[in-house]
Each structure stands twice: as C-alpha cells, then as structure tokens.
C-alpha cells in the first residue's frame, strides 16, 4: 500500500488525486494533506480520508481549521516549514506535488531529498530549477513521475523506444479561449473571458496561463528538463479538442502518441500506479465518435509566450526562473484587475530582457533571480 502525502490537496489537482484514491480502497493510505488557505475544504477532506497529519500554509488559519475537524485528533501544523516536514517524513513514501506556483518548490525539494516517489503536477519549480531538482533526486534515489497531462503523455509514449532514439516531442494545447480572437479582443479581455477554458477545468492560475499559452511555455522548459530533449526538438501544436496530449517521434520516423479525454484523473492515476496500470473506472475515450481531430501551428505573433520559453531555455541558468516569476506576478495582477490581459506578455518579455542571466549554481541564485523578477514586475504593475 502506498502511503501518500498530498501537497495542495484543496486545489484542482489535489481534489482529482483524492478522487483517484477513492477509486482504489485498500491500495493507498493518505498519510498527510496540505492546503494554502481553504480550511473548509481541508477539514472536509480530513474527515473523509482520516490522514494522520495535516498542514495549512497560512498560520492564521489554524484556529478556524481546528474548529472544523469534528473529533479528528491528528496533528495540525502550519507554515511552509510544516509543509516541508510533511513532504519529508518517512511515514509517506509517495508525495503528490500539487501546490500552485513557486510556493511548491521547497516542499517538493524536501520530498526529493528524502528519496521518495514524487508525482509532479506543480510545474513552476521544475521551470525555475529543474536541474537542481533532478540532481537532488539522483543523489537521494528519488523518482520523479510527471502528472502534467502532456508530460505524462510524453513519458508514456517514449516508453515505445529508447531515449537515444527520440527525435522530437510535440506538446499539444487547446489554444485556450482566445485561439481565434483578434489582437484587439485579447487586449480587452476580461478576467471572466480569460478564465473560460474551452476544454479543461483547472485552478485560476493555470487557466490564465492556458489563455496566454504561458502554460505551454512553462511546459516546454519542463519537458526539456524532464526528458533531456533539446529545445529545438520540442514543438507545440494547437489541438482544440484536447484528446491527443503529446506525440513523440523516433528516429525511424514512427510517431507514438497518448490519447485520452481531457480529465486529469487519468495522468494522476498513471503516476500513482506506475509502473502498473489499474482499472479505476474512469470514462473511456469514445474515439470512434470523434471526427475531425484538428492540429494547427500556434500563432506566435499573438502569443509570444512560446518564444519567451525558447529564449529563456536557450539562455539557460536563471532565465527560466525569471520567466516563471514574472509570469506569476503578472497573472496575479491580471486576476486582481490591475493590468490588461496582454500586458502579461509585455511584463514577462521586459523582465527577460532586463535580466542579467547567472549560472544556476545554487538554490540561492535561483531564489535571488525569482525575487528580482517579482519585484521588477510588481513595480511595473503599480
Ligand atoms: P489550484 O489553484 O486549484 O490549487 C492550488 C493548491 O495549492 C491549493 O491546494 C492551494 O491551497 C495551494 N496553495 C496555494 N498557494 C499556496 C501557498 N502559498 N503555500 C502552500 N499551498 C498553496 O491549482 P491547480 O490544482 O490547478 O494546479 C496545481 C499545480 O498543478 C500548478 O502548478 C499547475 O500548473 C499544475 N497543473 C494543473 C493542472 C490542472 O488541471 N489543474 C494540469 C496540469 C498541471 P488553498 O486552495 O487551500 O489556498
């Protein structure tokens, strides 16, 4: 039985992970759960799954949380250190990394440093410092399993050949709500319009990232670090139906793809049951009823995000961390109605242009670059 720590259990991925757990009674034990601020949801999950320990990132929420626990007598912890403690403790052997943004870095790293199996949905830390995370994993014997649907698809498809035979990776994306919008419509897009994703139901930050294609930009870097494919071998196609999640091309010309409904429970389940496949009763893809699967080149003029990723990735060092941090602050500013939608592109581009890239020699260097970019973008949003 795998003993789970779920970081970010109250989010979209966290809730889907618990739904997968619910489908396999006796196969998983939930050792610990963590939340940011949503104590109502954390308390409800605690009452159902009965973990031994829970933690909330915001210490001022502990009192409210305790009041909701209804006789449950496990440990309640608070703060970032507590999240790291739960991720690292030996009583869990599998950590699901599903916090949003850079906030997930330290707990995920704590799990890797203890040599655990770590299912990673939280892509931002990988973008910030993938090589440091890989090095930590290698040193401690930890295994990283991708949960992000495209990377799960690459991971699954790549098993059809040797790593040295892999020639090209194609990540697909729906194109988001502005796939066919004019530049003018995009400039004036409201928060509600940007949050209306055509195929996936996800947390707010990744939904905005999908509307700007910054999500795909982050995924290009994530794929480079996870699979060791050079940037010029990583391609993005718009595929509005979100059925083919990624394709890999081998050097003999064979293309292998993974298909599935746009439902995160499938890649989550695969990461949890790997290397086996179990029947969790998830809805099956009715491919025979699907006509017209469409693939298009992305419009890199209206969506400069992809170029940011290739630029930051090729420059290397702290550049991807700056791209990520600038985007996180810009997305928050857009969600708070402080900036226009397309200003996100300007802010990320400006931060990348101004940044003096450093080699990624330590976590401190990465965190400094992250803090610098956040401050730059905050100043520009005032
Ligand atoms: P959500 O916004 O739905 O959930 C985020 C989770 O992180 C919540 O549990 C939230 O807690 C917690 N959290 C937020 N801020 C902090 C903080 N400062 N410290 C600790 N915990 C915090 O996000 P998603 O589930 O959509 O996404 C999670 C990650 O997975 C992201 O990196 C995303 O890119 C990636 N991903 C998501 C997919 C999806 O379908 N949703 C698909 C592929 C990847 P609370 O709500 O209690 O405040």
Image (cartoon, grey):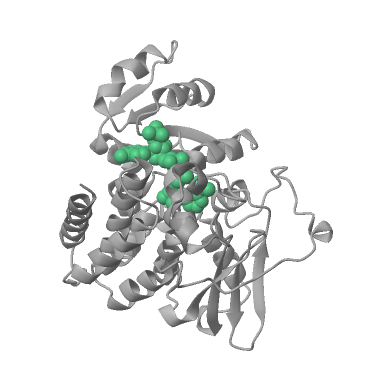
Residue 380: in sight, yes or no? yes
Residue under the image location 45 percent in, 77 percent down: 229
Q: Is residue 171 left or right of residue 279?
A: left
Q: Position of residue 307 (x, y in %)?
A: 39, 73
Looking at the image, residue 131 lies above or below residue 37: below
Q: Position of residue 243 (x, y in %)?
A: 67, 59
Q: Which residue lies furthest to the right in this view?
A: 288
Quadrant of the image where one finds ligand 1: top left
| Residue at the limit of the structure toward the front, as seen here | 184
Residue that appears at 44% across and 21% down: 40
The number of numbered badges drawn on the structure is 0
Q: Is residue 109 visible?
A: no
- Nearest to the observer: residue 329 or residue 54: 329
Picture coordinates of residue 234, whole percent (x, y): 48, 76
Residue 245's spot in the image, x, y percent? 61, 62
Point 42% across, 56% down: residue: 187
Residue 191 as seen in the image, left or right of residue 66: right
353 up-or-down from 56: above or below: below
Q: In which quarter of the image is residue 293?
A: bottom right
Looking at the image, which is closer to me, 143 or 221? 221
Residue at 30 percent of width and 44 percent of height: 338
* Quarter occupied by the N terminus: top right
Say left or right for 316 vs 207: left
């Amino acid at each position: 039985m795998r003993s789970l720590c779920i970081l970010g259990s109250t989010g979209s991925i966290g809730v889907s992970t618990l739904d997968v757990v619910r489908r396999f009674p006796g196969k998983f034990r939930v050792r610990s759960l963590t939340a940011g601020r949503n104590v109502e949801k954390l308390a409800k999950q605690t009452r159902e799954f009965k973990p031994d320990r829970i933690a909330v990132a915001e210490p001022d929420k502990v009192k409210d949380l305790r009041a909701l626990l209804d006789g449950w007598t496990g440990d309640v912890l608070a703060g970032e250190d507590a999240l790291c403690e739960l991720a690292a403790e030996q009583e869990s052997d599998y950590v699901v990394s599903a916090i949003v943004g850079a906030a997930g870095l330290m707990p995920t790293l704590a799990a890797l440093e203890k040599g655990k199996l770590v299912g990673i949905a939280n892509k931002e830390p990988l973008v910030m410092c993938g090589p440091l995370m890989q090095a930590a994993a290698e040193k401690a014997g930890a295994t990283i399993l991708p949960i992000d649907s495209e990377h799960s698809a690459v991971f699954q498809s790549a098993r059809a050949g040797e790593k040295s035979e892999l020639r090209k990776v194609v990540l697909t994306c729906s194109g988001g709500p502005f796939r066919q919008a004019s530049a003018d419509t995009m400039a004036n897009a409201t928060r509600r319009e940007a949050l209306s994703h055509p195929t996936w139901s996800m947390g707010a930050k990744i939904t905005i990232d999908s509307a700007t294609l910054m999500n795909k930009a982050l995924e290009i870097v994530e794929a480079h670090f996870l699979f060791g494919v050079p940037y010029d071998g990583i391609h993005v196609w718009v595929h509005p139906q979100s059925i083919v999640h990624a394709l890999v091309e081998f050097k003999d010309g064979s293309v292998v793809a993974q298909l599935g409904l746009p439902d995160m429970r499938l890649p989550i389940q695969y990461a949890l049951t790997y290397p086996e496949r179990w029947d969790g009763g998830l809805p099956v893809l009715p491919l025979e009823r699907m006509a017209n699967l469409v693939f298009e080149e992305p419009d890199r003029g209206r969506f400069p995000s992809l170029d940011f990723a290739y630029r930051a990735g090729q420059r290397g060092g702290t550049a991807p961390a700056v791209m990520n941090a600038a985007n996180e602050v810009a997305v928050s500013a857009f969600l708070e109605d402080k900036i226009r939608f397309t200003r996100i592109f300007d802010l990320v581009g400006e931060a990348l242009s101004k940044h003096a890239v450093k080699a990624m020699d330590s976590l401190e260097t990465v965190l400094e670059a992250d803090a610098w970019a956040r401050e730059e973008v905050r100043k520009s949003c005032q």
